[in-house]
Image (spheres, coloured by chain):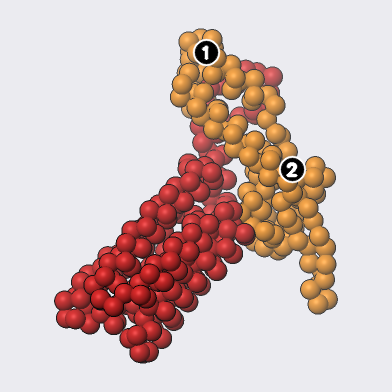
Chain colours: A orange, B red
Amino acid sequence: MAKSNAFRATREEKSKRGGPAFRAAESSATNLDRLIHERTRLAIVSALAVNTSLTFNELKQLLSATDGNLSVHARKLEDAGYIACTKSFAGRLPKTEYRLAAAGRRALEKYLDHMEALIRATREG
Amino acid sequence: MPQLDPFSRRPPEPVALDDRARDNLRFIRETMERAGSFTAVPGWGGVAIGITALGAATIASTQSEPNSWLLIWLGEAAVALAIATWTTASKAREARTSLFTGPARRFVYSLAPPLFVGALLTALLVRIDFNGAIPGVWLLLYGTGVVTGGAFSIRIVPLMGLCFIVLGAVALFCPWSWGNAFLAVGFGGFHILFGAVIARSYGG
């Protein structure tokens, strides 16, 4: 499978290399947003894009992620300013709530554009 | 499929990149659907429909002839359908058609059968000269469609449907002369109210 794909790729590269659409896709592939590309983080951002806010536990359930995994990835997004995190108490239990920040929404939109551009480029190329 | 590293220095492989991009889009869509809060139901469209319905109710209330009353409301239904189609399409476009035609289609498929039944029952009620029951029947069946269509959507959509059902049930047991007012409250008031909430919280 890997071999045949690679073979097909090299063969098609020869014929497609020169196309402007392909060149655009190729150059944009290198500045892909790594932060959002990772699956868990992509899921966090996507889930928050369609909810005003989600608690840590809701996200954990939704993504079937472990506590450690989720908090590491959420922290990375938070550090980048993609999501905002508020901590409060619901009774005695600590409650962590996440929201998508404006930068995060922009990043997701850019990522979607990017994916669509890749699909288009291959179709046209 | 081999795992591709899109950040490697190697030139990207076009076929694999394409597949991978599609896969990523599907992943985002599925996550959003599971997260459950995107709605294909257009909020502003609901507000617009509500306003036209209030207009229709005002005009209809001045009619003494039952047939012209019915015609005005049928006209309103056509206007509402046009607004709904247009705003749903543009919301889907803004939210990227590739991502959200699924939920919108599901909603339409669930809404269509009760509306069709409603049309048939309307014809029947006109035939047996029982126009008074029409508002209640409309509210009930529209509510049913919204509840089933919104079953997989955000909670506010089926809740709106439920409100229509309750209002329709009340209308069936009230004086027929109140029918027009019930339609105004339902198709006018509920649409504006819930439409505004949806527009504010769920992306337009």
First in residue order: circle 1 vs circle 2:
1
Residue at 62% over, 17% down: B11
- Which residue has dot 2 on it? A103
- Which residue has dot 1 on it? A19
In this rendering, the answer to whether B20 lies above or below B173 is above
Report if residue A34 is visible in the image: yes
Numbered-mark total: 2
Report if residue B106 is visible in the image: no
Subunit of mark 1?
Answer: A
Query: In terms of secondary structure, where does tag 1 sit?
Result: loop
The image's mark for residue B47 is none
Subunit of mark 2?
Answer: A
Q: Dot 1: few (<14), some (14–19), or many (≥20) neighbours within 10 Å?
A: few
Q: Nearer the viewer, residue B180 or B114?
A: B180
B76 to the left or right of A38: left
In this rendering, the answer to whether A82 lies above or below A121 is below
In this rendering, the answer to whether B133 lies above or below A29 is below
Residue at 33% over, 86% down: B176
Furthest-left residue in this view? B127
Q: Dot 2: few (<14), some (14–19), or many (≥20) neighbours within 10 Å?
A: few
Q: Nearer the viewer, residue B68 or A64?
A: B68
Residue at 80% over, 48% down: A78
Q: Amino acid at mark 2?
A: Ala
Q: Nearer the viewer, residue A12 or B190?
A: B190
Query: In terms of secondary structure, where does tag 2 sit?
Result: helix
Q: Amino acid at mark 1?
A: Gly
B92 to the left or right of A102: left
Indicate the position of residue B16 as horizontal and vertical percent values.
53, 27
Residue at 63% over, 36% down: A111
Q: Nearer the viewer, residue A117 or A61?
A: A117
Q: CA distance from mark 1 to mark 2?
A: 32 Å
Indicate the position of residue B124 as horizontal and vertical percent values.
19, 75
